[in-house]
Structures are given as C-alpha cells and as structure tokens.
Image: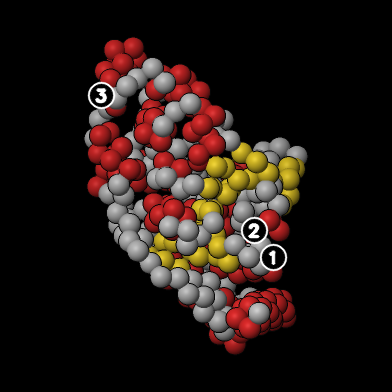
Amino acid sequence: MGVQLGGLAEKRPIAIDELGGRKVAVDAFNTIYQFLSSIRQRDGTPLMDGKGRATSHLSGIFHRNANLISQGIKLIYVFDGKYPSFKGAEVERRRGRKEEAEEKYREAREKGLLEEARTYAQATSRLTDEMIEESKSLLSLMGIPFVEAPSEGEAQAAKMVIDKQAYAVSSQDFDCLLFGAPILIRNLSVTGRRKLPRRNEYVTVEPEEINLGKTLSALGITREQLIWIGILCGTDFNEGVKGIGPKKALGIVRKQESLKDLLVHVKTKFGHSFLEDVEGIENFFLNPPVKDVSISFPAPDREGLISFLCDEHDFSRERIEKTADAIVRKAEEKGEQSRMGRWL
C-alpha cells in the first residue's frame, strides 16, 4: 500500500515530453503490480497465453514502456531484494486482504456481476517469482536495464536519484520520499483515460511531479518529521494509528521535538501503543540498505522480443513486430546522437 501523503505533497503536472532524454528509476514491483491489476479482461480475468499463464505484466511492460521509450525517456527498473523483518506483519496483512478479495471475486463472478468481479480481481494480484524473472527477461530484450536492490527497491531508486544517476523515481507510492528521493513522478505508467471503479465515469490520469525539498519547505517540517507522519498514518512496515490521517498527523508532529515525544503523545491522547519497532523503522528510512551501481543501456533485441512474446507467450506477431521495430529505431537514433555528440 505505501504511506498516503497525497494531501500534503507539493505537486505539479508534468508533460511526458519534459522527461525526454532523462533517466527515470522505476519502482519495479509497484509498477508491475499496477500492470497486473489494471490490464485485465472485462470479468477481471488476467490476460493469458495458450498455456494459461498470466501475461498482463508482460503486456504492460512491453507496450507502456515502448510508449515511454518513444518519448525519449530512459528507464531503469529497480527490483526489491529481501524485505526487513519488521515488514513481515504487513506482508501477512496483505495476504489476508488478497484472500478476502479472491472470495468476493468468486462470488461476484458466480452471480454474473462482472463490474464488481473486475474490481475485486484487481485486489487479488500476486507477483510470483516466475513473473519477476519473465519481467527481467523482457526488460533486457527491450534494452531497459534493471537493478537488484539489497532490500527495498524504492530506497535503492531514491539513492540513484540522490547520486544523480537518474532524474526521478517513478512510483505510485510516496515511500520513496521518506527514503529521501529528491523527486517523485506518479502516474508515469498509468497515464491516460481510466474508468472509475463501480461508476460509469472516466477520468484522465496525467503524470505529476513531487519535489521533496519544496514539500518539506511548504509544510515547515524536516524529513524526519515526514517519516513520523508516515509512521502515524501507516507505512509498509506498520499499521499506523486509527483516526489519524496525513493532515492530523502533520499537526501532531509539528509540536513534537523527538520520536520518543511523539510516541508518548500518541499513547496519552489516542491510547495507542505501537507494537512495531518504530525507532527501527525511522532508522530504516534514514539509513536503508542500498548499494552503488553502474548503469549501462543494452541494445534491444528485436528477434528475441518477437520470439519471447509471440512464440513463447502467444502475443499478436504483427503488433509486436511493429512496436519492436520502433524500439530498435529509437535506440539507433540515440546511438547516432551520442556518436555525433562526441564529434561536436
């Protein structure tokens, strides 16, 4: 789920073409989950190949990234490593929510309620080890590099932006701000017209840029206090305090001088004692396990793409060939521009 800071963050709309020529570190798990959730058939069933294997993630990676590549954006996917021990409780909570959604999905399908079925199906998405390996294979064939994080992918992506190896982190979650990412871009992979759940209405989703420094300045708080807000509202590592949303949390942390003071205040006024090691959580956001990386962009493999998607997973050959050709042309164009730059 990630911490919910939407009402506090300083946002600005950003056009896709503003990112042309820039490198963007993509929160891989978050983005691929979005593909698994949103790219489904009318009754909620994921796209599948002839062997019954889900291909929604592959469709999203290929077609939506191809569109971003055509705009000149250089993508770097960052995959999660081993999650910290204190994330175990949240992982179990998520598993329980998925099982509940699966039951409601089955009931809705049996009753022929396709709209409800699709809504519940979106909450059942699971990213398996096989899907992760397939995703990495497809990214390599597209010429998109990926990084294996020691722990949380958002933390590694944030470090890459801090180190100026990328311009921004792309994710739907705000957690990378708590990890210190200077710039977050939301909606990059879900841009376009989207139907609202259970309503016959559509909205246009546009990318938005969030600047950490401007956000902290506007709120009059430090990054540590932003982390406290996250802890109060709930993060990937703790449940948060019932009845406290971002705005109420902001008012509370502004009056506290330390995390210990905050915990005493919350226990006294809200009767809430954190079961999690919140000091450890704060330290994890401030000093996460990350590593230095060297990024290079491999050439896309046209024939490999066609074989992997069409021969192995039954995608439409005509459409894949057309898009693969466009990816290769863009890579050759970049290579020619790079060679010209060395001569000028």
Instruction: Classify residue 253 as left or right of residue 45.
Output: left
Q: CA distance from mark 1 to mark 3?
A: 48 Å
**Image vertical order of residue 71 relative to residue 37, above or below:** below
Across and down, in percent, residue 24 comes to: 54, 59
* Contact (Cβ within 8 Å) of mark 2 with mark 1: yes
Identified by mark 1, the residue type is Gln
Across and down, in percent, residue 209 comes to: 60, 45
Across and down, in percent, residue 250 comes to: 46, 23
Residue 175 falls in image quadrant: top left
Of the residues under marks 1 and 3, which one precedes in the sequence? 1
Label 1: few (<14), some (14–19) or many (≥20) C-alpha neighbours in 10 Å? some
Assign the C terminus to one quadrant of the image: bottom right
Give the colour scheme of this rendering: secondary structure
Q: CA distance from mark 2 to mark 3?
A: 41 Å
Of the residues under marks 2 and 1, which one precedes in the sequence? 2
* Contact (Cβ within 8 Å) of mark 1 with mark 3: no
Q: Secondary structure at mark 2?
A: helix
**Image vertical order of residue 7 relative to residue 313, above or below:** above
Q: Nearer the viewer, residue 278 or 62?
A: 278
* Contact (Cβ within 8 Å) of mark 2 with mark 3: no
Label 3: few (<14), some (14–19) or many (≥20) C-alpha neighbours in 10 Å? few
Mark number displayed over residue 19 = 2
